[in-house]
Amino acid sequence: MCRNIKTLANFEPPATNDEIRASALQFVRKLSGMNSPSRANEAAFNHAVDEVTACAHRLIFSINTAAPPRNREAEARKARERAKVRFGQPPAERPLVKPND
């Protein structure tokens, strides 16, 4: 689950509230071990997501850096290249293997 949490600081354009909340949701899911809470735990789960969202928002928008803002498209391209090296060709590019009849 946490592998899906993306870096949100120092991007142009800045992270949106939806991106920050999605990241907080993934974090709370990982900590709690629940993808979706039961009715008994729903209030506590949602409260935790709200709290983490607020903390993450404060953190992301209070960080000062001398580095230039990152470009989302360039970072996505680099991630795809790393994935190619790590995992090989994407499934759509793999040759079809016919089973032996």
Image: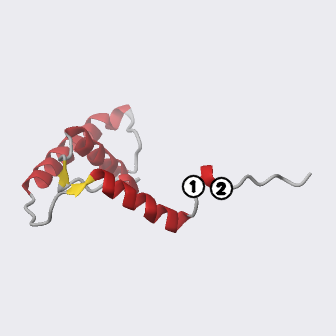
Q: Residue at x 36, y 31 (%)?
A: 39
Residue 24, percent from left and from top: 26, 47
Label 2 Cα crowd, 10 Å radius (few <14 / some 14-19 / many 20+): few
Q: Quadrant of residue 43?
A: top left
Q: Is residue 11 left or right of residue 5?
A: left
Q: Residue at x 40, y 46 (%)?
A: 34
Residue 90, percent from left and from top: 57, 55
Q: Is residue 98 left or right of residue 87?
A: right
Give the camera-side residue of 22 and 31: 22
Number of numbered tags placed on the structure image: 2
Q: Is residue 14 left or right of residue 86?
A: left
Q: Inspect the image, locate mark 1, and give the three-letter code of the amino acid beneath it.
A: Pro
Label 1 Cα crowd, 10 Å radius (few <14 / some 14-19 / many 20+): few
Q: Residue at x 25, y 54 (%)?
A: 71
Mark 1 and mark 2 residues within 8 Å of each other at the beta carbon: yes
Q: Inspect the image, locate mark 2, and give the three-letter code of the amino acid beneath it.
A: Arg
Q: Quadrant of residue 64?
A: bottom left
Give the camera-side residue of 85 and 7: 85
Give the camera-side residue of 32 and 75: 75
Residue 67, percent from left and from top: 14, 66
Mark 1 residue element: loop
Q: Is residue 85 above or below residue 73?
A: below
Task: Provide the residue designation for mark 1.
Answer: 90
Residue 94 marker: 2
Mark 2 residue element: loop
Q: Among all residues in the image, which is located at the extreme top?
A: 39
**Color encoding of the figure:** secondary structure
Measured Cα–Cα span from mark 1 to mark 2 = 7 Å
Q: Is residue 99 left or right of residue 10?
A: right
